[in-house]
Image (cartoon, rainbow, N blue to C red):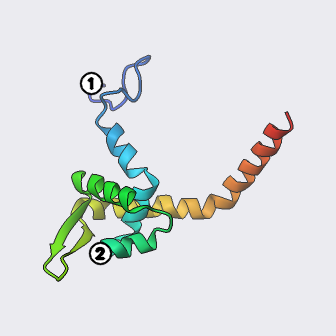
Amino acid sequence: MDTSSSPLPPRGAPRFSAECPSRPILDQISDKWSMMVMAVLEQPTRFNEIKRQLEGVTQRVLTQTLRRLERNGMIRRRVLETSPPGVEYSLTPLGESFRGPFTRLYEWTVEHSDEVLTAQCAFDARASGQ
């Protein structure tokens, strides 16, 4: 059996090397604001509407998040010919392809949030009793 095309590194080698191209992508898409922006963009949406839907995000952080998502090909930025000029964001086909895995991840978090909170409380109780 030919194992030269195996996705796993040789035994003893780091599983995720520092040069692995997946690392910055995983960092981007697992960022909480990126995940929330992707959820908000069910249809083309203006900047201020995105901001209104993401309680707690600052204008600076939202701008940085949108730029990273655009740079990674997940969203498209379109300047609107209005007065004053507006900006609208939408998912690209690549961003749309992420909707399925994202939806499953989101559903998992909702389904298991009580269990996670229970585990956190139990951990905190043990840690404070030491």
Which quadrant does the N terminus fall into? top left
Q: Farthest residue in the right direction?
A: 129
Of the pair 56 and 11, the residue shown nearer to us? 56
Q: Quadrant of residue 3?
A: top left
In terms of secondary structure, where does tag 2 sit? strand
Residue 92 seen from this side: no
64 displayed left or right of 130? left
The residue labelled by disc 1 is 4
Of the pair 113 and 56, the residue shown nearer to us? 56
112 displayed left or right of 40? right
Along the polypeptide, which appears first: circle 2 or circle 1? 1
Which quadrant does the C terminus fall into? top right
Q: Give above or below for 9 relative to 70.
A: above
Q: How many marks?
A: 2
Residue 50 seen from this side: yes
Q: Identify the amino acid type marked 2.
A: Arg
| Other residues around mark 1 within 10 Å, as few (<14) / some (14–19) / many (≥20) | few
State if disc 1 and disc 2 touch (CB < 8 Å). no
6 displayed left or right of 123? left
What is the distance, in whole Å, between disc 2 and disc 1 at their CAs? 48 Å
Q: Quadrant of residue 59?
A: bottom left
In terms of secondary structure, where does tag 1 sit? loop
Question: Residue 62's spot in the image, x, y percent?
Answer: 37, 60
Name the residue at 33% across, 40% down: 24
Question: Residue 43's spot in the image, x, y percent?
Answer: 30, 76
Q: Identify the amino acid type marked 1.
A: Ser
Q: Farthest residue in the left direction?
A: 81
Name the residue at 43% across, 50% down: 30
Q: Farthest residue in the bottom direction?
A: 83
Q: Which mark is residue 46?
A: 2
Name the residue at 63% across, 59% down: 112
